[in-house]
Image (tube, grey):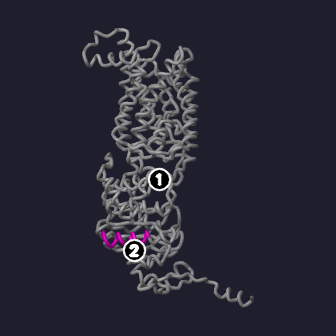
């Protein structure tokens, strides 16, 4: 599946500020696009616009060349699956019940999930390694567990594209790696396209093919990861000095993005004084 | 909290439970009939030996108690299922036909129609119309920027409910104290006396159709509890499902209210008991609520008509028996979350 956004513009009604300006992007099969930007700059808004949950002011989203609003709801959501930020859930559905809900777009209005759906739900839970959670209640889970449940739920729809909103925020190192490697695996093995919002440029460098940097004024840098995630660009987007360094770990090279304190001068000053 | 597995036995049991309760309760009353006799009399029209039966028993069972038991079963099932539906729809454990103002709205509609001594169909439609008004008003008031929070919903439900209760008082105030007022007052407290098959036939189709809609949408109800973005992204038509469930639940409530007045508590009590027993999946909660609701109401109504010499209004009983029972359950299980 090829997903495109062409010249998307968006602002919230009754506000002046243009949140998104002239956004264009394209995600092919098995490609990963990561969206980066400061807090409150409109990353989630961009995702919602892309998927048609919010309406573009101008411009459009296309799925395989067909404008999104021409595709009937159920058909669209069989192709695209959305993984929202895992907020502490208040529902005491078990993990398996929650994952089965992902099958909804494939069932008719009055249809109930049957044996096939339950099997599929289980196999998706197996794919992301959470079968042991099947009877655990969602409101008793940790953030990491719930995030994996939501990813499994998205997979049960058998989508061609996954859209994830900051899946690795609020998770510890181990869980971050689990989520990221899971996403990478899915895109490699199943050819699923992925759009992922993240706060960590390192993660984008690790798994993404393309990157989109969203700026405060609604404009964006878009291109291949290595081209977009540069010290200069990050400095402009996050208004903080950033260093990118390669770290050798055994045979692999990891690119690290390190924010550097802006007030170097003043710190030196303080040290001198001391 | 252990969850009972929802197997075949469980399903059969659920189906049988209200029927067994009904058969037992038919025999109870001032004129007592044993269970064996009851079953014989009930089966006699099917077997064809109706004429061999004791004619008093036949007339007590078929013309007095059976319609009333049937009514109780439908009312119990209906109020419970609409309570469960509202709770799922608004993601709010406190949402019931009573707390959302639907019951009060429907009461006003019915009372208004009774004031003009209209026939039952008009009473039904009027109850339905004002019930819809009430739920829409509550929904509208509680919405802030497309989001509804639990407290706002309950508060606006209270406001709408008291508004319509005031209007009911107005109707009572202007009603003729000689013949119309006592009728309205007694009906408001909830009573199942004097039900006839023809009245039953007028109300039951509404309750049945609404209940069936909710029953078949029960799995989707789980999705309605998620945030609206999530629900949409799971490929359901959120607006359509919301309107369908809201309409169906209001239909059921209004019809119940117009047949036997405002019977409180059931819509809160029964769905929560179901959740405590079987977990929060609405796929289970809805059928369990239907079954337990029917059974609960049959037992309550039997107690209402046979506990004392004079009949006790059923809403008093549901509150007096329901509240302590619910409190005990709450304390024991720590309450079931949605």
Q: Can you name the residue that lies furthest to the right here?
A: A274
Label 1 Cα neighbours within 10 Å, binned few <14 / some 14-19 / many ≥20: many
Q: Residues within 10 Å of mark 2 (few under 14, many from 20)?
A: many
**Location of residue A238 (image quadrant):** bottom right
The magenta region covers A178-190
The correct choice, above or below, for A202 with respect to B14 in the image is below
Q: Is residue A183 magenta?
A: yes
Query: Where is residue B273 drawn, in percent x and y?
Result: 48, 38
Q: Nearer the viewer, residue A1 or B53?
A: B53
Chain hosting mark 1: A
Callout in the foreground (1, 2):
1
Please report the residue visible at 46 percent of the width from the left and 28 percent of the height from the top.
Answer: B297
The residue at which mark 1 appears reads as A137
Q: Earlier in the sequence, mark 1 or mark 2?
A: 2
| Chain name for mark 2 | A
Residue A58 in view of the camera: yes
Whole-angstrom CA distance, mark 1 to mark 2, is: 32 Å
A90 sits to left or right of A194: right
Q: Is the residue under label 2 in contact with that under label 1 (CB below 8 Å)?
A: no
Q: Is residue B115 visible?
A: no
Q: Residue B319, which numbered label?
A: none
Provide the residue designation for mark 2.
A33
In what element is the residue under mark 2? Answer: strand
Which residue appears at 43% of the width and 33% of the height? B292
Please provide percent x and percent y for residue B185. 54, 22
Question: Residue A14: x percent and y percent?
Answer: 52, 61
């Amino acid at each position: 599946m090829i997903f495109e956004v062409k010249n998307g513009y968006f602002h919230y009604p009754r506000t002046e500020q243009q949140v998104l300006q002239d956004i264009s992007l394209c995600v092919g099969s098995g490609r990963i696009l990561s969206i980066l930007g400061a807090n409150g700059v409109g990353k989630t808004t961009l995702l919602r616009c892309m998927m048609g949950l919010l309406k573009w002011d101008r411009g459009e989203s296309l799925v395989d060349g067909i404008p999104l609003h021409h595709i009937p709801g159920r058909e669209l959501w069989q192709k695209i699956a959305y993984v929202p930020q895992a907020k502490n859930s208040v529902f005491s559905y078990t993990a398996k019940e929650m994952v089965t809900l992902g099958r909804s777009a494939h069932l008719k209005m009055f249809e109930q999930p049957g044996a096939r759906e339950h099997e599929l739900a289980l196999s998706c839970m197996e794919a992301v390694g959470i079968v042991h959670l099947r009877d655990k209640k969602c409101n008793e889970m940790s953030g990491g567990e719930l995030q994996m449940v939501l990813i499994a739920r998205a997979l049960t729809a058998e989508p061609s594209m996954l859209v994830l909103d900051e899946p690795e925020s609020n998770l510890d190192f181990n869980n971050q790696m689990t989520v990221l490697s899971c996403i990478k695996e899915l895109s490699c093995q199943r050819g699923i396209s992925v759009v992922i919002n993240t706060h960590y440029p390192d993660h984008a460098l690790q798994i993404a093919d393309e990157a989109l940097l969203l700026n405060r004024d609604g404009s964006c840098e878009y291109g291949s990861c290595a081209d977009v995630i540069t010290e200069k660009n990050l400095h402009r987007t996050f208004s903080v000095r950033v260093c990118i360094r390669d770290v050798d770990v055994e045979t692999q090279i990891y690119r690290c993005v390190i924010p550097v304190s802006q007030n170097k001068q003043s710190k030196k000053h303080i040290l001198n004084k001391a | 909290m252990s969850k009972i597995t929802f197997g075949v036995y469980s399903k059969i049991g659920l189906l049988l439970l209200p029927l067994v309760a009904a058969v037992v309760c038919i025999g109870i009353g001032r004129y007592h009939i044993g269970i064996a006799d009851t079953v014989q009399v009930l089966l006699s029209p099917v077997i064809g030996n109706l004429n061999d039966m004791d004619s008093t028993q036949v007339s007590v069972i078929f013309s007095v108690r059976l319609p009333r038991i049937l009514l109780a079963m439908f009312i119990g099932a209906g109020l419970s299922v609409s309570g469960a539906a509202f709770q799922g729809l608004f993601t709010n454990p406190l949402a019931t036909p009573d707390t959302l103002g639907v019951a009060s709205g429907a009461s006003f509609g019915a009372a208004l129609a009774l004031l003009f001594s209209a026939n039952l169909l008009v009473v039904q439609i009027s109850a339905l119309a004002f019930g819809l008004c009430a739920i829409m008003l509550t929904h509208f008031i509680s919405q802030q920027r497309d989001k509804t929070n639990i407290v706002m919903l309950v508060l606006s439900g209270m406001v709408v409910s008291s508004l319509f209760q005031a209007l009911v008082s107005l109707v009572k105030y202007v009603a003729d104290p000689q013949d119309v007022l006592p009728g309205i007052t007694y009906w408001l407290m909830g009573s199942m006396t004097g039900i006839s098959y023809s009245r039953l036939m007028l109300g039951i189709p509404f309750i049945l159709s609404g209940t069936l809609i909710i029953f078949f949408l029960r799995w989707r109800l789980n999705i309605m509890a998620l945030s609206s973005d999530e629900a949409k992204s799971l490929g359901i038509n959120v607006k359509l499902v919301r309107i369908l469930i809201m309409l169906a639940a209001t239909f059921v409530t209004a019809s119940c209210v117009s047949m036997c007045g405002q019977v409180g508590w059931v819509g809160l009590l029964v769905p929560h008991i179901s959740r405590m027993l079987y977990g929060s999946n609405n796929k289970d909660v809805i059928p369990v609520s239907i079954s337990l609701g029917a059974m609960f109401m049959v037992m309550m109504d039997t107690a209402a008509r046979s506990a004392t010499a004079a009949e006790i209004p059923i809403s008093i009983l549901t509150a007096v028996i329901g509240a302590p029972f619910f409190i005990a359950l709450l304390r024991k299980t720590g309450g079931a979350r949605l």
